[in-house]
Amino acid sequence: MIAFWLWLATSAAADSSAPVVFEAHSLQPGVRVAEPGTNWKCGEWRWESEPAETDRIFEARIEMECDIDAPLGSSLARVREEMLATLHRTRKVHAGPDVVTESGLSGVRYDVTIALKDADEGVRVREEAIIASDDRSRLIYQTRSKEISANGMAAYLRRLAFRAEVRRRDAAAGETAGYRVKLWNLVAIERPWYALGVMFRSIAKGKVRDKFEKVRAELLPRIAESLRKEGELK
C-alpha cells in the first residue's frame, strides 16, 4: 500500500525486476528490538502525535531512536558516500546536486524520481532528497514528496516525508563509542469515500507501523556495516 520509505528500502526494488513484497511485522510500544549477534538496538516506536484524519486525509507521524555500537575510529564519511551512491543508482535525477545547509550541516539536494512496485501496486514518487553531514558527528538524510502517481490502493497516497538523523554518542557524558539514529516518517493518505473512518484509520495505522518497522530492520544493519568498514580502514 505505502510507497517510498528510504534509500535502503528502495535499492532492492530498483536493482531487481521482481516485485517487492513487504512482510508484515508486529512491533509494539515499549519493546526494544535487537537482532542476535548485531551491534545495534532500537527503542520503542512512538507516534509523534496521535494520527488523525482531517477532511478525509489521514496523517501519521511515527518515530524511533536506535543505538549503533561502532569502532572508535569510525566516521560517517562512508555512510554518506553509500547513501549518495544508492541515490544515483536507484533514482532518476532531474536536478542536483545543489549545495544546501540543513540543520547546520553542509549538504546536497537533489530533485529525483523513484519508481517502485509493492505487490500489484506501481508507484512513482518525485521528491526532494537531501544528504548532509560533517562526516564526523552528524548526518542527515531526508526526503519530501513533491508529486505521487500510483495505481491500486497506493493511488490514495497524498504526501510522504522521511528523515534519518545520525549523531555520534557523547563520550564526555560516559556513553560508549557509537552513534544514535533517530528515524522519523510522515505519511498522508486520502480515505476512499467508501471506507468506514474507524476501520480505515485502524488499518492505515497498522500499515504505517509495519512499513516503518521494515525500514528499521533494513536500515540499521546497513549503517552499522558502513561504520564497521570505515573503522577497519582507520
Image (spheres, rainbow, N blue to C red):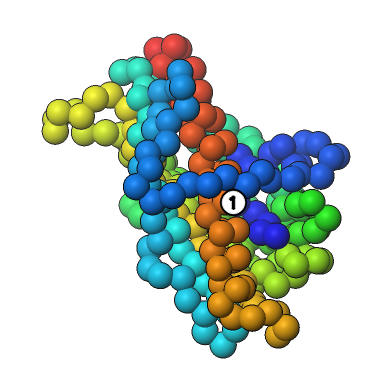
**As drawn, is 46 to the left or to the right of 159?**
left
Q: Judging from the image, what secondary structure is the residue with disc 1 in?
A: helix
Residue at far left of view: 173
Numbered circles on residues, count: 1
**As drawn, is 183 to the left or to the right of 109?**
left
Disc 1: which residue? 211
33 versus 154 height, above or below: above
Quadrant of image for the C terminus: top left
Q: Nearer the viewer, residue 32 or 220?
A: 32
204 versus 180 height, above or below: below
Q: Which residue is at a point 66% across and 44% down the rendered structure image?
A: 23
Q: Nearer the viewer, residue 167 or 28?
A: 28
Q: Which residue is at a point 75% across and 52% down the rendered structure image?
A: 118
Q: Which residue is at a point 52% across and 80% down the rendered structure image?
A: 53
| Residue 136 pos. (x, y %) | 35, 32
Residue at far bottom of view: 55
**As drawn, is 114 to the left or to the right of 80?**
right
Residue 181 appearing in the image: yes
Q: Amino acid at mark 1?
A: Lys
Quadrant of image for the N terminus: bottom right
80 versus 189 height, above or below: above
| Residue 218 pos. (x, y %) | 57, 36
| Residue 92 pos. (x, y %) | 74, 50
* Few, some or many residues within 10 Å of mark 1 (<14, 14–19, 20+): many
208 versus 12 height, above or below: below
Q: Which residue is at a point 57% across and 32% down the rendered structure image?
A: 82
| Residue 153 pos. (x, y %) | 75, 67
**As drawn, is 71 to the left or to the right of 169?**
right
